[in-house]
Amino acid sequence: MKNLNLLVVEGNIPKENDNFRKYGIQTHADSLKDSLEYYSKDLNIEVFNPCSEKSFDKILPKIAKYDGLIWGGSSLNIYNDCIEIRRQISFMKECFKNIKKILAICWGMQVAVTAAGGKVKKSTNGAHIGIANDIEINKNGINHPLYTSKNKKFNSPAFNFDEVVTLPEGAINLASNKINKIQSIHFKSEKSDVWGLQYHPEITYHKMITLINLRRDRLINDRKCFKDEKEIQNHIKFIEEEIKRSEKNSRMLELRNWLNYLKAA
């Protein structure tokens, strides 16, 4: 069997990635590459960042060669109008025309939903800071190939302040929790079959804790997610307990299942 050609899309702006590297944190694209290669070495992976390209002239002529696209996280908010967000939505629409299978994660799902005519807003039930608890697969998701061998209820690394509130036409919701009614979706847009996740199976809890520490001031003073340092530290201890219970293969099953879906084509 030939190697799969995958395009990984980085959602963060270059400045945010520079900040990640300054503090020894993997970019989201690098986290995706490592997690994908954990399951298969027979992958040709290229990374593209729509935010750092003034045009798509270099990528578009070869975009149809990719067997799949996986689009990762970002610290952006889709409802804020800026050139970096407009570029990402525009590029997603180009992907719909050319790539048959897309896995869109967190920010990636929000971009995909917006590009396909759905809506994303600030979450009304709070945020996920490092972890999403009690995600439950619904009757639509229980037999979906995304969730093969997955426990019906599970926790996952997650970091989001926004949520999908209106699905694209024909989309189905596959899972929910108390914070976000829409935790995973499946829809078709032009040539693309899109699986979307609001949470991050590809990111470790250790990375999430590092991100919390990096964003402490913002989480207390700007986002108002915690009232003080003690509350943040207690939350980190809660995630550390989840690390003891969590098992890597179970956490990342959605990635394995998507790769199997690609290979079955």
Image (cartoon, grey):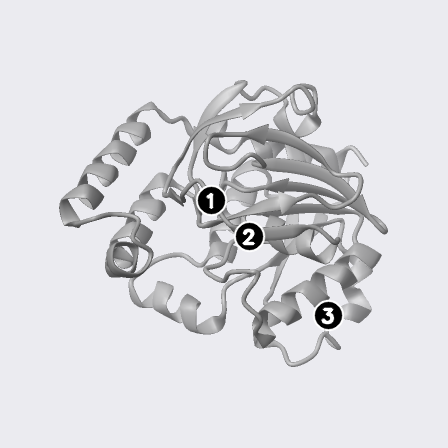
Looking at the image, residue 94 lies above or below residue 139: below
From the image, tell me which residue sits under label 3.
59
x 74%, y 54%: residue: 117
> Which quadrant of the figure contains the N terminus?
top right
Instruction: Please name whichever residue, 212 or 14, is drawn nearer the observer in this view of the structure.
Output: 212
Answer yes or no: do the residues labelled 2 and 3 have beta carbons within 8 Å? Answer: no
Q: Is residue 200 left or right of residue 187?
A: left
Q: Is residue 246 left or right of residue 176?
A: left
Looking at the image, residue 167 lies above or below residue 59: above
Q: What's under tag 2, amino acid-wise?
A: Lys
Question: Residue 186: image x %, image y %?
Answer: 71, 37
From the image, tell me which residue sits under label 1.
124
Q: Earlier in the sequence, mark 2 or mark 3?
A: 3
Q: Is residue 45 left or right of residue 27?
A: right
Q: What's under tag 1, amino acid-wise?
A: Thr
Q: Residue 71: in sight, yes or no?
A: no
Cα–Cα gap, marks 1 and 2: 8 Å
Question: Residue 211: image x %, image y %?
Answer: 33, 53
> Which quadrant of the figure contains the C terminus?
top right
Give SS at disc 3.
loop
Cα–Cα gap, marks 3 and 1: 37 Å
Crowding near pointer 2: few (<14 within 10 Å), some, many (20+)?
some
Looking at the image, residue 208 lies above or below residue 201: below
Q: What's under tag 3, amino acid-wise?
A: Ile
Instruction: Please name whichever residue, 110 or 166, is drawn nearer the observer in this view of the structure.
Output: 166
Give SS at disc 1.
loop
Q: Earlier in the sequence, mark 3 or mark 1?
A: 3
Looking at the image, residue 141 lies above or below residue 94: above
From the image, tell me which residue sits under label 2.
121
